[in-house]
Image: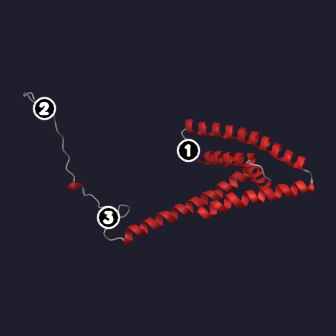
């Protein structure tokens, strides 16, 4: 995991820098600088607008008693898009603008939902195999003893005030 983070925070900025230098060599440094500034401002504005819309949808769903799961994922993706768009670079700008497209977010939600479901299923299966493989431990998720009706004692009580004082 640490290696992945290291690669993420070193290779992506280096690739972005290379792309910006390459684009600058094709056009000019002023145009490249302008591109970075314009995409940052435009992206932040769009992300703010869509984020506000997502926040309103979340509040509406909560007031109506519905779970805002899909809208929350939209909000998270819009937040990530905003972070990508204010980061100088061509790749991050393309990813950021792609995340601001609702159809792209819908496709990502489907794939993300499948990924989360598979991860959760693997986690549950690994925990179940752990519990069943350790005979000395109680299986809290497995079989439960059933209680018969004749084993239940129904009791009523009445509290009486004592005449003695403590």
- Image quarter of residue 19: bottom right
Alpha carbons under labels 2 and 3: distance apart: 42 Å
- Image quarter of residue 47: top right
Provide the residue designation for mark 1.
67
Quarter containing the N terminus = bottom right
Alpha carbons under labels 1 and 3: distance apart: 35 Å
Q: Which mark is residue 31?
A: none
Q: Do callouts 2 and 1 mark residues in contact (Cβ within 8 Å)? A: no
Expressed as whole percent of the image width and height from the top left, the position of residue 18 reads 81, 59
Provide the residue designation for mark 2.
160
Local crowd size for mark 1, using a 10 Å CA cut-off: few (<14), some (14–19), many (≥20): few
Provide the residue designation for mark 3.
138
Local crowd size for mark 2, using a 10 Å CA cut-off: few (<14), some (14–19), many (≥20): few
Query: Residue at the location (69% across, 52% down)?
Result: 106
Is 24 placed above or below 1 here?
above
Sequence-wise first label, 2 or 3? 3
Q: What scheme was used to colour the molecule?
A: secondary structure
Query: Residue at the location (38% across, 61% down)?
Result: 141
Camera-side residue: 95 or 69? 95
Residue found at the far left of this picture: 164
Expressed as whole percent of the image width and height from the top left, the position of residue 48 reads 71, 39
Expressed as whole percent of the image width and height from the top left, the position of residue 73 reads 62, 49
Sequence-wise first label, 2 or 1? 1
Q: In the shown orientation, is residue 126 left or right of residue 157?
A: right
Is 85 placed above or below 21 here?
above
Q: In the shown orientation, is residue 27 left or right of residue 133?
A: right
Camera-side residue: 82 or 49? 82
Please identify, in this view, whether the residue under mark 1 or under mark 3 is nearer the observer.
Answer: 3
């Amino acid at each position: 995991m640490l290696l992945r983070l290291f690669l993420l925070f070193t290779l992506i900025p280096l690739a972005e820098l290379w792309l910006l230098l390459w684009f600058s060599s094709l056009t000019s440094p002023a145009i490249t600088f302008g591109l970075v500034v314009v995409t940052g401002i435009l992206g932040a504005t769009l992300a703010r607008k869509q984020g506000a819309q997502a926040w309103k949808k979340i509040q509406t769903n909560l007031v109506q008693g519905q779970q805002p799961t899909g809208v929350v994922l939209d909000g998270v993706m819009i937040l990530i898009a905003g972070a990508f768009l204010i980061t100088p670079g061509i790749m991050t700008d393309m990813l950021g603008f792609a995340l601001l497209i609702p159809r792209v977010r819908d496709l990502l939600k489907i794939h993300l939902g499948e990924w989360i479901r598979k991860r959760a299923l693997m986690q549950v299966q690994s925990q179940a195999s752990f519990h069943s493989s350790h005979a000395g431990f109680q299986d809290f998720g497995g079989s439960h003893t059933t209680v018969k009706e004749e084993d239940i004692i129904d009791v009523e009580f009445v509290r009486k005030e004592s005449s003695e004082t403590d």
